[in-house]
Amino acid sequence: MVREYVHNDLPDMIRIWNEVVEEGIAFPQEEPLDLESGAAFFASQSYVGVAETGGRIVGLYILHPNNVGRCGHICNASYAVSSEARGRHIGEELVLDSLRVGRKLGFRVLQFNAVVESNSHARHLYERLGFKQLGTIPGGFRMKDGHFENICPYYREL
C-alpha cells in the first residue's frame, strides 16, 4: 500500500533514502540525511509517498516541480526502495502512485532528469509504464567509485 507520509515515518524514510545515497549508483546526492535535514527535505516536496508492507515502510518517493514558471507543469520524482524489499514490485507501486498524484496536483508531465544508463531495472520499469527516453547524456553521472556513466532522461505525459 502506498500512502502519504506522516512525521512518524521519518526515521524509516531517512534510513531508506540514505541507503540509496550510500550505494552511490542512482541518486545524485552525496550527503546522508539526519532527522533534522530529512524532515526539512521531505517537507519541502510537493508530495511524499511511502510504501508500507506489514506495518513497515519499505519504500518512498518524492514529487516536486522539475522547473518553475512556464515549465512548472512538469514534475520530477525520485524513488527509493529498501534493499530488503527489492524485487517485490514496490518500485512499480511507487511510480504508479506518483503518476496518479502528479495528475491530481495539476502536473501534465513527469520527467526524470538523470536515470543512470546501467540502472536497467528502473529503465525497464519506466519503459514498460510508457515513459520515453529523451536521449543520452554522456558521462552525466559520477558513480561512487569515481567513474562516469551515461544518464538517460525520460518523460511521460500524465
Image: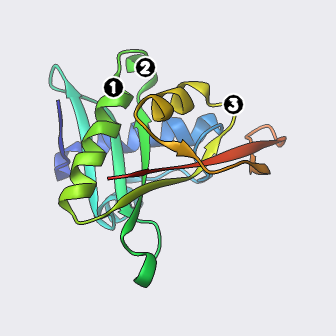
Q: Position of residue 133 (x, y in %)?
A: 59, 44
Whole-number angstrom distance, CA of label 2 to CA of label 3:
17 Å
Residue shown at 35% from the left, 29% from the top: 92
Residue type at the position of mark 3: Ser
Residue that badge 3 annotates: 118
Looking at the rendered structure, the number of numbered marks drawn on it comes to: 3
Q: Quadrant of residue 148?
A: top right
Image quarter in which the N terminus is found: top left
Residue shown at 19% from the left, 52% from the top: 7
Residue shown at 46% from the left, 53% from the top: 33
Q: Classify 10 Å Cα crowding around label 1: few (below 14), some (14-19), many (20 and above).
A: many
Report the mark closest to the observer, 2 or 3.
3
Residue type at the position of mark 2: Arg
| Residue 111 in view | yes
Q: What numbered label is drawn on residue 86?
A: 2
Residue that badge 1 annotates: 90
Picture layout, residue 148 above or below residue 55: below
Q: Are marks 1 and 2 in contact (CB under 8 Å)?
A: yes
Q: Position of residue 155 (x, y in %)?
A: 49, 51
Q: Classify 10 Å Cα crowding around label 2: few (below 14), some (14-19), many (20 and above).
A: few
User: Counting residues from the N terminus, which is met first, the one under dot 3 or under dot 1?
Assistant: 1
Whole-number angstrom distance, CA of label 3 to CA of label 1:
20 Å
